Image (cartoon, rainbow, N blue to C red):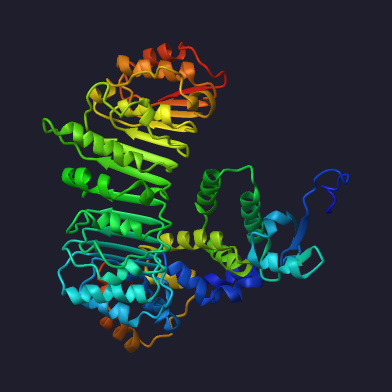
Amino acid sequence: MEKTKPCPSTKRLKQNPPSVDRLSRLPDAVLCQILSFLPTKLSVATSILAKRWRFLWTHVPTLDFDGENHNIINRVIMLHKVQGLTTFRLCYMDKCDDYEFETWITTAIARNVQNLDIGLNYQFMLPRCLFTCKTLVNLTLFNCVGIPSSGAVSLPSLKKLHLYFVRYQVDEAIPHLLSGCPVLDELIIEGIVDKDLLQDGVSKHISAEMLTSLIEADIYFDYYKNDGESDDYFQSVVKFIDSLRNVKYLKLSSGMELEPGGDFGGPESIRRFDNLTKLELAIDWLFLTRFLKSADNLEVLIISEVDGYLRYNWMKPKQVPTCLLSHLRMVRIDQFWCTKYEFKLVRYLLKNSKVLKRMEIYSPNNEAKFDTLQKISLFQRGSETCELAFY
Amino acid sequence: MVTTDEKGPLTAKKKSVIIRSCDGDEFLVSESAAVLSTSLKKILEEKEDRLIHLSDIDNKTLAMVIAYLSTHADDGLSDDLKRSFDQEFVSGKEFDVLKYLVLATDTLQVTCLCYTVAKKMADIMKNKLVEWVRREFDIQNDYTPEAEAEIRRLDAWAWDDRQLEDD
């Protein structure tokens, strides 16, 4: 337990005479900045420190609720005085009346909130005014309902949109939402894109125009295997990926298994990814071949873990891809199981990458590590300055 | 003392500024680093003189702020490197040191550093006792026992677990 030392200020006075007076009165703005990094509960708890701190928390530009009950949330929001709310985070696990929830969100919007993060245990209807909020920059929704499929959507400042397990009535809702986000550069959608939606909804409704401002995308595709349907599903996935044509950073994950030599629609129709500089794949290696061909400016390639059989689809391109000749400088392979497919890939990349600076390989297979490293270090290298790191 | 980078006119010489702490020591700083502080930028726009005297900031603190400004003005460093510099910059520093830093960054209006330091201070404050916070911020408890009891009653939820408790 901490105890007060006798007269700690005397020592400080000697060390830093000029600012000790100022220090004992850090400006309110600075104190509020410090408190803004604390959960609201702790921020309120500082009111016990001294009279000056009694209502200091009401000027802190963030509200961060984590599990408080509705009476407490109501009290805090009513006392809180800040008009320019930077962050409103609400992690709410109880039930309450819809109008209460609606009031909280509406109040945050009226206070010009920039970052809104809502996570719920029970689904409440999001108020419509959320979707015309001019100040919103980051929006994260977890387990909410009420994304409108028609009517006004205008989020002119929104840059990051994260939707986790968000439900809506019709497939048009997400495309409609995206159409109102002109400067969006990061989109995460998790847990809602089911097969029917992807086939009939997203690929049809999210046209390329809607996603061209995206610069960072992290997409996980669920895995379905219904005979006769898998090819349609695959085609809709490809179409969707194609609509992300301006991304700079792309991460694709899926346990989806593709037919060997899966059809990307022929070489002519492969969409180019000229802006793509960093690619992370945890997906069938057929995609790897495809992206090497279409992302001429790729600099960083990360190959994350996928099920073993998804590696069988690595096919070396007929021509050495442009990115290997001029841009690819870093390759990381996260789970190297020492299969012949993996060796083939590493051999190909080392041989043909002319400007590669570093290749990192992480192998969980401890016993074979030394042999593997020896084997790989003998592979021919297209880039003299390439270093190989093996973990 | 400020003659180190006097070179011929053909060398692309970076302009420098001298900043004097309240202890009287002087620091030579490139102008590109100095202007990352909104306050210094304003001063430099207003006066010809390349000497700035900061009566509120001591040697030790000023040296730290200048190290930060110089790192962030270095175009040769990637954003990732700058971010990891920021993390190391605040890690392991005592609360007392951070207080002087946050005050200096507020005075000099170095928003990013102020943010980083404030966040670090908040992280340290979590799970600390009321007495600890009072001591570290030099706060005199001026509540009457009755007033303090009332606050505790009104917002009892704020102290219902171990955070910011009394000992």
Could you tell whether A11 is left or right of A44 in the image? right
| Residue A97 rendering spot, x and y as whole percentages | 16, 75
Q: Is residue A45 visible?
A: no
User: Could you tell me residue A260's position as x and y percent?
Assistant: 24, 21
Which quadrant of the rendered structure holds the C terminus of chain A?
Answer: top left
Query: Residue B65: x percent and y percent?
Result: 63, 58
Residue A307 visible here: yes
Q: Is residue A331 above or below residue B22?
A: above
Where A4 falls versus A47 (above or below)?
above
Horizontal side, residue B91 vs residue A281: left or right: right
> Which residue, as the protein is rendered here, is positioned at the far left?
A227
Q: Give whichever of B118, A317 is nearer the camera.
A: A317
Q: Residue A267 is drawn in which quadrant?
A: top left
Q: Residue at x 27, y 41 (%)?
A: A220
Q: Is residue A154 left or right of residue B115?
A: left
For the image, the number of numbered tags is 0
Position of residue A255 measured from the top left corner of the image (x, y, whole percent): 22, 33
Q: Nearer the viewer, residue A345 or A65?
A: A345
Which of these two is toward me, A327 or A306? Answer: A327
Q: Quadrant of the N terminus of chain A?
A: bottom left
Which residue is at the front of the view, A270 or B66? A270
Residue at the spot x=32%, y=65% of the render? A153
Query: Is residue A70 positioned above or below B67 on the image?
Result: below
- Residue, far right: B8
